[in-house]
Image (cartoon, coloured by chain):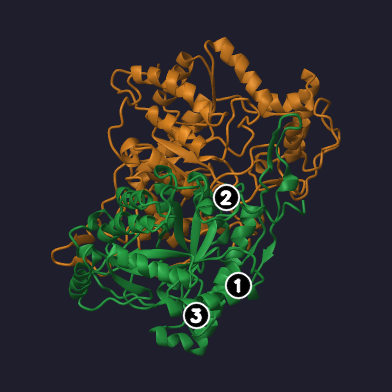
Chain colours: A orange, B green
Amino acid sequence: MSKSPDKPLKQIHLAAHFPGVNNTTVWSDPEAGSHIEFSSFAHFARTAERAKFDFLFLAEGLRLREQGGQIYDLDVVGRPDTFTVLGALAAVTEHLGLTGTINSTFNEPYEVARQFASLDHLSGGRAAWNVVTSWDAFTGENFRRGGFLPQEERYSRAKEFLGTANELFDSWRGDAIAADQESGTFLRDAKAGAFVHQGQHFDIQGQFNVPRSPQGRPVVFQAGDSEEGREFAAAGADAIFSRYSTLKEGQAFYADVKGRLARHGRTRDQLLVLPAATFVLGDTDAEAEELSREVRRKQVSGATAIKHLEFVWNRDLSAYDPEGPLPDIDPDLGEHTVARGRAQVRMYRDPLATAREWRDLAEANKWSIRDLVIETGNRQSFVGSPATVAETINHFVQADASDGFILVPHITPGGLDAFADTVVPLLQERGVFRTEYEGTTLRDHLGLAHPDAGTTDAGMTGATFVPTPVPASADH
Amino acid sequence: MGWHPAAWREPVARPAELLTARYWTDLVAEAERGLLDFVTIEDALGLQSSHFTEPDGRTDQVRGRLDAVLIAARVAPLTSHIGLVPTVVTTHTEPFHISKAIATLDYVSTGRAGVRVQVSARRNEAAHFGRRTLPAIEGVEDLGRADVRELTLDLFDEAADYVEVVRRLWDSWEDDAEIRDVATGRFIDRDKLHYIDFEGKHFSVKGPSITPRPPQGRPLVSALAHEGPTEAPFRLLGRSADIGYVTPRDARHARTIVTAVRAEQDAAGRTDEPLHLFGDLLVFLDDDPAAARDRRERLDAVAGQPYTGDAHIFTGTPAQLADVIQELEQAGLTGFRLRPAVVGHDLPGITRGLVPELQRRGAFRRAYEADTLRGLLGLARPASRYAASA
């Protein structure tokens, strides 16, 4: 362990990502339950709360993904409305934070602000918002505004959207409601909720109609990894996701992001770094390794492997045998047309080079298409016995590769149960994870200050905070 | 707190708890205790106001509220039979979002969701969204003005389009679309998912929904409609509603309204489809009729003026209210939406006074006979409109 005498152990933050619309989720497993019935969400949330997790996380996608002009049918398809399911989960949990991914392109600030403020009231201060954005006309076809937002403007719209929402959250002082039955004064201030916002994307004014909520503002998460994104996170987000699952990459990202905070007048504990992480547990490390291979084979069926190859080739490859060799034709370098409504297509910046590299790998190892996709795909972040996984997680956090993890189980809804029962107690024994909730709000759990209810937040106004937009179709 | 603007001043009111989950859970639990079919939850995209369409700047009445869909969702897991019908404003929201929100409410309540759609002609609410500029409307007398008539027709036409989109999205997944076919690796049969391809004046929506078809198939759609210079409100009921709320003054007026709405229903080609018509009544209930009258007078005095609203105000005993209800039922109404003047007093007046009275008369259920809102209202679960064409 990377523990030095003068450095106290960091407390780990843990969150649970409800499995969903991606091929991480193994729906074919006999243990896999419904992805839409509320009982699955309630099971998952109760497990997370039993394990004293900081929060539950829901992703969002506002149009069903398509590939080759048809709705993609190999992964889980379908999910609930984020706000509605979080509102219901507030009824079956008492402490667990409730984090929803909500798109800033296909919503309006007044409505989203009142939804988050309402969720915060109805959960007693447990609401959090993962701000994402999108620009694609494909998703826009489901909405009033359509798809006319130029790609470069999604950043400025997202920035202004969140800034405007913060103005609305701050428009009610904490003491605005007197509710004095004796004197008949309900409001102390007739102007409670008053706001005026004039900007490039929003020109709105009036009175916000949800009084100040327990957290003042929901906790704000953002994902994304660009220079711009890191800088914006450092300026004002409460937590940033990352995708780095190796220690070295994680440490580099962590040092970079935390190192930016001082320039924004913020301290290192005001921005949490929480990578998403998958895991496979076994009674022994060897058993977990074997299970891990099995899970990865289940995650990539032959059909899924072909579809994955199409992200790179940008061609219909349905004629190829997944158990056979890679295509000898080259990727189509034109505009990506095969897959729509998902982020993966942008992972491969140089399709020709990737194709070459994959062909070489497959030839050298005698891999079929499916073997290749499995072998080049991400191994689970944590594989091992509960003791090994607990040790690894703790090491990552104490070595400043993260402040904790957002765990993504591969089975719905029971995929978190074993982690809760076996890994969490080991972390608690080490004194690095809470044994009881100490506060009531998500800000309490995350060690974040509550915005001052009486005055407008002077140090970090909404207007200076720019979220890093990530594609709405991405699951983190 | 109640429909009377001074309700929050009553000792039984809990004004400091208005924004808590406990307050709403208690109310809905009380309604469920009384075996009511459903509760509706009011909402608006602006502060409450005593003015017809403009903000009033008052500080002596309840101001501030929570999102009604979220309240319904928060209450759903803690109740088991009662229907949950939040209000949504069609004028400024996205049919795609609302469709999946109400579908999800149907999931989290296992088949008890409905929605009450409402248009907004308030300029201040439009300014909260910055997409439309609306004309000033000072009072009911302005509803006949040419520009206001035009606006009314447009808002209600948009609401009808909105309901059409919301329902098509509910139907866009056939019930058996999820197949989990391990052999072929397919989670869904995509031939059972459908684009809705709606194109209208205010929005176009491609579909399909991101949310599978909800337990009731189509959650119930309801709307409040008044007589006025345009036929638009009644036409919306005739074209689009499963439940219409109407505001009769008396039995004769109820007959007129029922005739008018049924004519719109026929004109929309829905003669054979069920359309419930619920009469709205604002109620002051006490065991002694004089006590109810006194309470109303006291509240009016506290408010500084007599309260009048769109709905008839009933003052009296549970037995007298049962008489009124049965008379209105004879006039063609199929149900009643009672608005408690003071929730803390008049909701128990309904559940513990009126309900037992109606049960004695054999006019109200003695136990919940169904698990879904459709079941409670005697409405069959519809097949997806796309199922036959697939």
In the rendered image, which quarter is residue A433 located in?
Answer: top left
The mark lying in front, picked from 3 and 1, is: 3
Asked if marks 2 and 1 touch (Cβ < 8 Å), the reply is no
Where residue B219 sits: x, y (%)? 55, 55
Quadrant in which the C terminus of chain A is drawn: top right
**Disc marking residue B216:** 2
* Residue drawn at 17 percent across, 67 percent down: A184
Note whether A248 is above or below B154 in the view shown. Answer: above
Which comes sooner in the sequence, label 2 or label 3? 2
Q: Amino acid at mark 3?
A: Thr
Q: Please state which of residues B291 and A177 is positioned toward the viewer in this rendering.
A: B291
Residue sitting at the far left: A182
Q: Secondary structure at mark 1?
A: helix
Crowd class of label 2 (few under 14; some 14 to 19; many from 20; radius 10 Å)? many
Question: Viewer-nearest of labels 2 and 3?
Answer: 3
Q: Which residue is mark 1?
A: B265
Check residue A453 in the rendering and tell me which mark sits there, or answer none. Answer: none
Residue wearing tag 3: B256
Spatial separation of the CA atoms under disc 2 and disc 1: 23 Å
Q: Is residue A161 visible?
A: yes
Residue type, label 2: Gln
Camera-side residue: B124 or A247? B124
Tell me: B190 left or right of B80. Answer: right
For the residue labelled by badge 3, is the local secondary structure a helix, a strand or a loop?
Answer: helix
